[in-house]
Amino acid sequence: MIDASFFFCETPECDVVYYAEGGRRLFDKDDLTVRVGVKERDDPVPVCYCFGHSERDIVEDVQTHGRSTIYEAIKDNVRAGLCACEVTNPSGRCCLGNVQKAIQKARPEVPAVGLHRVRAGGPR
């Protein structure tokens, strides 16, 4: 039987997913049947477990639309009570924070074309 008090390890470099008080490991990545997004580097890296979205999906969405339509769709589904993050997400938390992080990673750096520096007090 597993101790009911366990914690989720968010450290990407660590193979431990769940541990007990005192740091005793309960489950490593290899013990689970689902990929743990924060622990993965290779596609597909899951970010939304309820609706099946990966980091790659977010990147493609942002490239296609210039913004994330996936984020809005997930929010709408959450409002409608259609999510089950506490059961499907290995962290037991809502995925929207991870989705937002994936969106930030997906946004390309936009160069400041045509912008120039203006001195305080205006041009001289």
Image (cartoon, helix red, strand yellow):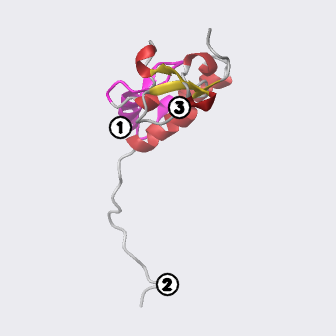
The quadrant the N terminus occupies is: top right
In the rendered structure, which segment of residues is drawn in magenta? Answer: 42-71
Residue 40 belongs to magenta span? no
Inter-mark Cα distance, 1 to 2: 37 Å
Q: Secondary structure at mark 2?
A: loop
Instruction: Tell me, yes or no, whether the two marked residues, 1 and 3, touch with CB atoms within 8 Å.
Output: no
Q: Is residue 47 left or right of residue 77?
A: left
Amino acid marked by disc 3:
Cys
Amino acid marked by disc 1:
Gln
Inter-mark Cα distance, 1 to 3: 31 Å
The residue pinned by badge 2 equals 120
Inter-mark Cα distance, 3 to 2: 48 Å
The residue pinned by badge 1 equals 63
Percent position (x, y) of residue 60? 35, 32
Percent position (x, y) of residue 17? 50, 25
Extreme residue in the bottom direction: 124
Label 2 crowd bin: few (<14), some (14–19), many (20+), radius 10 Å: few
